[in-house]
Image (cartoon, helix red, strand yellow):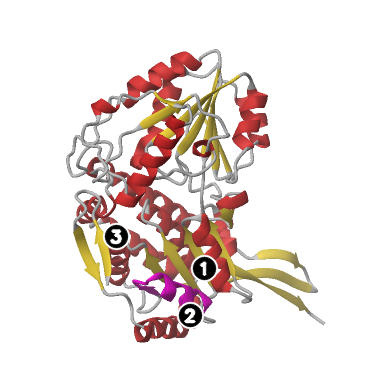
Amino acid sequence: MLKTISPIDNSVYLERPYASPDEIENVLKLSNQSKIIWKNTSLEERKELVSRFVDSFLSNSKEIEEELCRQMGRPISQCSGEMRGFEERAKYMIDNVDRALEKVVSKNDSEFDNYVIKNPLGTIFIIAPWNYPYNTSVNSIVPSLLAGNCVILKHSSQTPLCAEQLLKAAKKAGIPDNVFQILHLDHASTSKVISDKRIDHVLFTGSVSGGREVKKAIGTRFIGAGLELGGKDPAYVRSDCNFEHAVENLVDGSYFNSGQSCCGIERIYVDEKIFDNFVDAFKAQTEKYVLGNPLDENTNLGPVVKLSAANNIRNQVSTTIQSGAKNIIDGSKFKNDNSDNCYVSPSALIDVDHNMPFMTEETFGPTVGIMKVKNENEAENLMNDSAYGLTAAIWTSDKGFAKNFGAKIQTGTFFMNRCDYLDPGLAWTGVKDTGMGITLSVLGFDHLTRAKSFHLRKV
C-alpha cells in the first residue's frame, strides 16, 4: 500500500494500493493502442480538448488547494499560487503550440517541395515530484498531449491525489480514454515501466540519484529523457542594488514553500560594502514569519514534507554551526520547532565558506547561507563553484553589467532583480548535475517530437 503521511501532524492522510503487474500491463497496452488515434487527431481538436482539461482542473481549485496543503504542507494561503502558475503555463503552451509545431520549409518552388514536420514520439512517461506537484507536471503533461503523445503519469507517493485530480479533469474534459492515464507505483515498478519498450520518452523531476536510476532503467534503449534534478541556486547582491527590494525578494526566495523549491535561493553573496546592513535587514524580515499549521490562514511558513527531511535539515544546520557558522535568526520566535515534528525554523547562516558542505550540497529547506564578497570576480567564482546549475540571480541597477555577468554564470536561467520564478516563454533547463532536456517555451516541444523530412521533387 502507498501511504501518504501528512507533515501537518504526521498522521496517515490517505492510502492507495500500488498498481499490480496486470494493471501496469493493461495501462501500457492501452496507451500503445491509443498512440495512433491521438496522433491523427487534428491539432485544433487537441487544443480544444486540452483547453477544456485545464478549465476543468481549475474549476475544482478549492478542493485541490486543501488537498495540496494536507499532502505536502504548503500554507493554504499560498496554494492558490500553484493554480495560477498551472493556468499561466498551460495557456501559454496552448497559445503557442502552432508556432512550436509548424512545418519547417526548406524549399518550395516549381520543382521541389521540401519540408520538415514534427511527429509525436508516442507514449511519454512522466514522473512528477511533490514540492510543486501541479506546476511541474503541467510543464510536461500539456505539451506532451498537444504534440500528439499519450501520457502515463506517476506522481510522488506524497501527492497521489494530484494525479487523481488531473485524471478526473481529463475525463471530464473529454480527452479520449487511455490517452492520459495514471499509475501509483513503487520504485521497482517505476523502473520496470521506464524499461518497457512501449515507453518512448521519460520526463523526471527529482533528485540527482533518482535521475541516475532513470538513466539506468532506460539502459541500452534509444529513447530520450528529460531530467530536472538538484540545485544549489545562488544570488549576488551588488552594492548598487535597490536594497529593500533585494532583501524582500531574497527572504521570500529562500523560504517560500519552506525552501522546498528547485530554484529557491540556497546561498547569497553580498558585496562587503553593504553586507552588515543586509544581514541586519534579512534577519528582521525573516523574524516576521509565522511558522505553524498550514491550514491556518495566518501561517506563511509551513512544515517541510516529512520528518526525515526535517531532521536532515536540522542536522545540516547544526553541523555547520559546530564548524564555526552563526545563525542570525532568533529561533525562540519559532517555538513549535522540535525533533518530533516537521516544523523547521527558518535559519540564515553567516561565517560560512565553501569548505562547509552546507554551501555546496542541496539542503531543500528553510535555510540559507550568506557570504561577504569583495567584488564581482569573487562572486562569479563562488557562484560557479557548484555541482549544479539551474538558476542564479543578481540584484543590481545596472542591466548591462547583469547581462555580462550572467553570461559567465553556469546555469540554465539567469535572473536580474528577481528569483524563484518561471516565465513559460523561456526555456527551463539546467547544466551539470541539474540534469538535461528542456521544458517550457516553444523549445520544450522539440524534445517531445521527432523530425520527419519530406523531399518531394516534381519530374
> On the image, numbered disc 1 is attached to which residue?
202
> Which quadrant does the C terminus fall into?
bottom right
Extreme residue in the right direction? 459
| SS under mark 3 | helix
| 331, above or below 425, in the image | above
Q: Position of residue 29 (x, y in %)?
A: 43, 86
| SS under mark 2 | helix
Q: Give whichever of 423, 209 is nearer the camera.
A: 209
Q: Give whichever of 157, 351 is nearer the camera.
A: 351
Q: Can the viewer see residue 195 in this picture? A: yes
Image quadrant of residue 102? Answer: bottom right
Q: Give whichever of 62, 406 is nearer the camera.
A: 406
> On the image, numbered disc 3 is attached to which residue?
57
Extreme residue in the front direction? 322
Task: Write the residue at 42% across / 70% down.
Answer: 187
Q: Is residue 410 left or right of residue 71?
A: right
> On the image, numbered disc 2 is attached to which residue?
35
| 199, above or below 377, in the image | below
Local crowd at mark 2 within 10 Å, few (<14), some, or many (≥20)?
many
Local crowd at mark 3 within 10 Å, few (<14), some, or many (≥20)?
many
Who comes first in sequence, dot 3 or dot 1?
3
Mark 2 and mark 3: Cα distance apart in space: 24 Å
Q: Position of residue 71 (x, y in %)?
A: 26, 55
| SS under mark 1 | strand
Q: Is residue 379 left or right of residue 156?
A: right
What range is drawn magenta here?
Answer: 180-195
> Which quadrant does the N terminus fall into?
bottom left
